[in-house]
Image (spheres, helix red, strand yellow):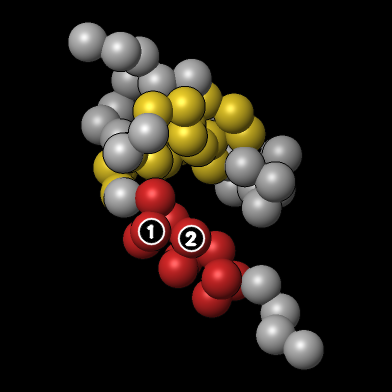
Amino acid sequence: MPEFVFRKSSYSDHEHECVEVAANLPHTIAIRDSKRPQDPTLHVTPAAWTAFLTMLLPHP
């Protein structure tokens, strides 16, 4: 089974709110709490992740 390669999200506060995202597999985005990497991860489709990020970005 392929492994997720996590990176810290640019939306994270590097001292308190730390989210890591893995987007190295083509059909799944994995999200986890960097302070608890042993806990289960949230898996979403790339389309769902894009929609979520679009909601976070300021709209002109």
Q: Pick the quarter of the image with the C terminus.
A: bottom right
* Residue at position x 66%, y 72% in the image: 57
Distance between mark 2 and mark 1 Cα atoms: 5 Å
Left or right of 26 in this view: 40 = left
Secondary structure at badge 1 equals helix
Left or right of 36 in this view: 56 = right
Q: Place residue 25 in its image quadrant.
A: top left
x then y, percent, for residue 50:
48, 60
* Residue at position x 59%, y 28% in the image: 7
Category of crowding for the residue at label 1, using alpha-carbon neighbours closer than 10 angstroms: few (below 14), some (14–19), many (at least 20): few
Q: How many marks?
A: 2
x then y, percent, for residue 31:
41, 40
Q: Nearer the viewer, residue 30 or 28?
A: 28
Q: Nearer the viewer, residue 55 or 32?
A: 55
Q: Is residue 37 visible?
A: no
Disc number for residue 57: none
Q: Is the residue under label 1 in contact with that under label 2 (CB below 8 Å)?
A: yes
Disc number for residue 47: 1
Taking 53 as reference, is 2 above or below it?
above
x then y, percent, for residue 55:
54, 75
Q: Pick the quarter of the image with the N terminus.
A: top left
* Residue at position x 40%, y 21% in the image: 4
Category of crowding for the residue at label 2, using alpha-carbon neighbours closer than 10 angstroms: few (below 14), some (14–19), many (at least 20): few
Q: Nearer the viewer, residue 27 or 32?
A: 27
Taking 58 as reference, is 31 above or below it?
above
Amino acid carrying label 1: it is: Ala
Q: Is residue 58 visible?
A: yes
Amino acid carrying label 2: it is: Thr
Disc number for residue 50: 2
Secondary structure at badge 2 equals helix
Left or right of 52 in this view: 18 = right
Taking 52 as reference, is 45 above or below it?
above
